[in-house]
Amino acid sequence: MSTSVPHRPEPVAAATDLVRERFPGAQQAWLGGSVVLGGATPMSDLDITVLDATATAHRESLRHQGWPVELFVHTEASIRHFVTRNQVERKPTMARLVARGVALLSGDGGAAVRHYCDEVLRAGPAPLPAEALVGARYALSDLVDDLQAAERGPEGTAIAVETWRRTAELVLDVNGCWRGGGKWLMRELVSLDSDAGTTWAPRLDAGLSAALTGDTVPLREIAEECLALTGGRLWEGFHQAASIDGSS
């Protein structure tokens, strides 16, 4: 299948045209994502957040002037709601779209909520609760054991990928960094490495690549290194009370 991209206007111009056409009463709009922050590919879309006091909050996927567009339409209250929800998830998706996006409309509309998002982004996530840290140590310890016994094949692949993901998230947690989903998980690791002079991102990448070809030692070693930052392996003696609704 061809991945060629037709001629299309510059992203800020295309995004601005869409907002003016679809949301004439918008207070402000921001273009975020890879086309602004870097790392864009020919398949990248335009992530546009629209602030419109009269709108019903929603997201929509569409095409405009040859660009695929992810449209996030919000009021100030709904932006704050999703920022708060993202803080619990430790993934600053909404805050980053607004605080690091390029403003598309003139004037100072949305200045207050943009400042709020910037403060949240700069502050970073709250410290990982003690119970959550214990649970993360337990889960990763169990995965390391599974990985040691894993054979090449579908199950081994699944164990290796989950070990990589859990290790990456725990590294970010113990360093007080935001998490990310998909490519953003690796981007957060790269950012940590850049700030702290560490090498988690390339070593985890190499470890996963080796594990997928049958050599699980490098990935197990880096997972053990991560666990050492949290007090080491945890399995025997682990205890977690069930919540009221019966989940554990």
Image: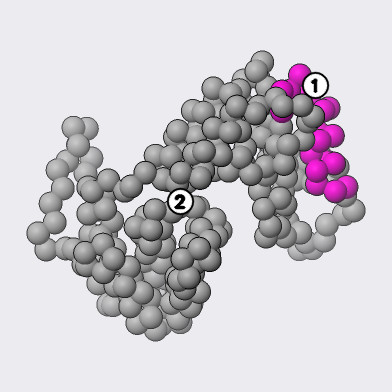
The residue most toward the left is 237
Q: Which residues are magenta?
A: 9-28
Q: Is 168 drawn above or below residue 95 in the view shown? A: below
Dot 2, crowdedness within 10 Å: few (<14), some or many (≥20)?
A: many
Residue appearing at x 52%, y 38% in the figure: 119
Query: Residue 178 — which label?
Result: 2
What is the chief secondary structure element of the magenta stretch? helix
Is 81 left or right of 44, judged from the image as shown? left
Provide the residue designation for mark 1: 24
Q: Amino acid at mark 1?
A: Pro
- Membership of 185 in magenta stretch: no
What residue appears at the point 27 percent right and 77 percent down from the top-left corner? 149
Q: Counting residues from the N terminus, which is met first, the one under dot 1 or under dot 2?
A: 1
* Relative side of 150 to 213, left or right: left
Q: At 16% across and 48% down in the image, what residue appears?
A: 240
- Is residue 139 found left or right of 11 in the rendered image? left
